[in-house]
Image: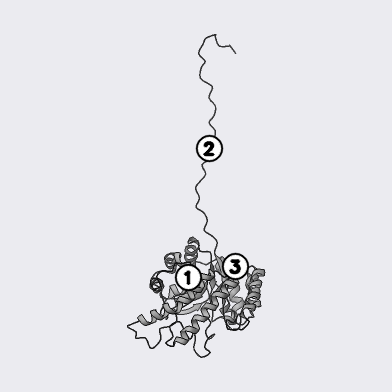
């Protein structure tokens, strides 16, 4: 190689290959996994201990615990001690919990869901309010993420053309419950129930405005997917998206349009994959609880079949569901 002459201008540096660059594709963060539970109102033939162990063994994340005489009696004189034992057992089993208050005859052995928050008798309304306030305390002691409730049917003394009185009673009955919920840090989750005064998502928003919009961390929504199929004008997946800001509890089962009958998955008309996708996309982290209250005779088997279905939902209308 010949050395450059003195004073010569050096030539350009030899070229080197440019380093390879890797483009990292942008990814959308995965939606949080849904957390599934099963309602004890569909396991009434089992002792509560047996029901909790069953659900844990099946891989459920939690339980929708209905306060009733056969499991956790809200009227028991030693309720606090019983609640403490249940809380420890839930912790041992790794189960989350929502407190549900839909027991049929817990207050009156002759009237289903009576007395309600709309009862013509002030003492009746007060009894339901006391039950809900007690449920809030139970929920706080259990570490529950919400307390579920509903309005009740419009009483016969209310003219069908004027529901002002019924809405006034509902607001007044819920006010002290909301006070307790605020103090306990446990949101109330009101469920639109077919046939009740508060039957639809639109009715929930009416109540929310009537109470001055307490906010979803205090007054939230229980969304029942079957009820959406039964009654709402929008598809269930659209109902989930519309309800997302207020979701504090979710119940799930199959159902047919216009027929309020809770059905095992695959026995109704709901296309579940879009519903579950919409629910996951909201970021909802409460429990999604299977509600089959009329199927306790087959509770253990339906609990197994339901979790299998929810983990691997079928195509349209639950074609391969059990």
Q: Nearer the viewer, residue 241 or 256?
A: 241
Q: Nearer the viewer, mark 3 or mark 2?
A: 3
Q: How is the image coloured?
A: one colour
Q: Is residue 39 above or below residue 1?
A: below
Q: Reading the chain from its start, which is encountered first: label 3 or label 2?
A: 2
* Residue lying at the far left of the rendered structure: 161
Q: Which mark is residue 61?
A: 3
Mark 3 vs 1, N-terminal side: 3
Query: Are the residues flagged by discs 3 and 2 in contact, CB closer than 8 Å?
Result: no
Q: Nearer the viewer, residue 316 or 213?
A: 213
- Residue denoted by label 2: 21
The residue furthest bottom is: 110
Disc 2 secondary structure class: loop
Q: Nearer the viewer, mark 2 or mark 1?
A: 2
Q: Residue furthest top?
A: 6
Specify whether 142 is left or right of 223: right
How packed mark 3 is, by other alpha carbons closer than 10 Å (few <14, some 14-19, many 20 or more), is many
Q: Is residue 134 visible?
A: yes
**Residue at the image point whose x is 51% and y is 77% from the top:** 263
- Tell me if residue 258 comes above or below residue 20 in the rendering: below
Density class for disc 1 (Cα within 10 Å; few <14, some 14-19, many ≥20) is some
The local secondary structure at tag 1 comes to: helix
Disc 1: which residue: 317
Q: Give percent across and percent down for residue 322.
A: 56, 73
């Amino acid at each position: 190689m010949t050395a450059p002459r003195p004073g010569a201008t050096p030539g350009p540096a030899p070229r080197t290959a440019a380093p390879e660059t890797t483009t990292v594709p942008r990814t959308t963060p995965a939606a949080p996994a849904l957390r599934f539970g099963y309602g004890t109102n569909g396991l009434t033939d089992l002792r509560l201990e047996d029901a909790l162990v069953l659900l844990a063994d099946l891989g459920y994340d939690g339980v929708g615990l209905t306060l009733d005489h056969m499991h956790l009696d809200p009227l028991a004189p030693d309720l606090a001690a019983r609640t403490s034992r249940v809380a420890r057992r839930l912790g041992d089993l790794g189960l989350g919990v929502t407190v549900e208050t839909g027991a049929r005859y817990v207050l009156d052995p002759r009237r289903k869901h009576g007395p309600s928050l709309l009862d013509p008798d002030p003492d009746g309304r007060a009894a339901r309010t006391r039950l809900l306030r007690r449920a809030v305390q139970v929920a706080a002691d259990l570490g529950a993420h919400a307390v579920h409730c509903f309005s009740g049917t419009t009483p016969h003394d209310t003219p069908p053309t004027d529901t002002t009185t019924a809405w006034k009673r509902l607001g007044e009955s819920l006010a002290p419950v909301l006070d307790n919920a605020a103090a306990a840090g446990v949101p109330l989750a009101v469920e639109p129930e077919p046939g009740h005064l508060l039957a639809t998502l639109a009715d929930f928003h009416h109540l929310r405005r009537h109470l001055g919009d307490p906010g979803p961390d205090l007054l939230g929504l229980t969304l029942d997917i079957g009820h959406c199929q039964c009654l709402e004008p929008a598809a269930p997946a659209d109902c989930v998206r519309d309800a997302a800001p207020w979701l504090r509890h979710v119940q799930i089962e199959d159902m047919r349009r216009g027929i309020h009958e809770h059905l095992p998955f695959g026995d109704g008309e709901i296309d579940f994959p879009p519903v579950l996708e919409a629910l996951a996309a909201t970021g909802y982290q409460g429990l999604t609880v299977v509600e089959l209250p009329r199927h306790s005779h087959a509770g253990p088997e339906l609990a197994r079949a339901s979790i299998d279905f929810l983990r691997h939902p079928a195509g349209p209308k639950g074609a391969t569901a059990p």
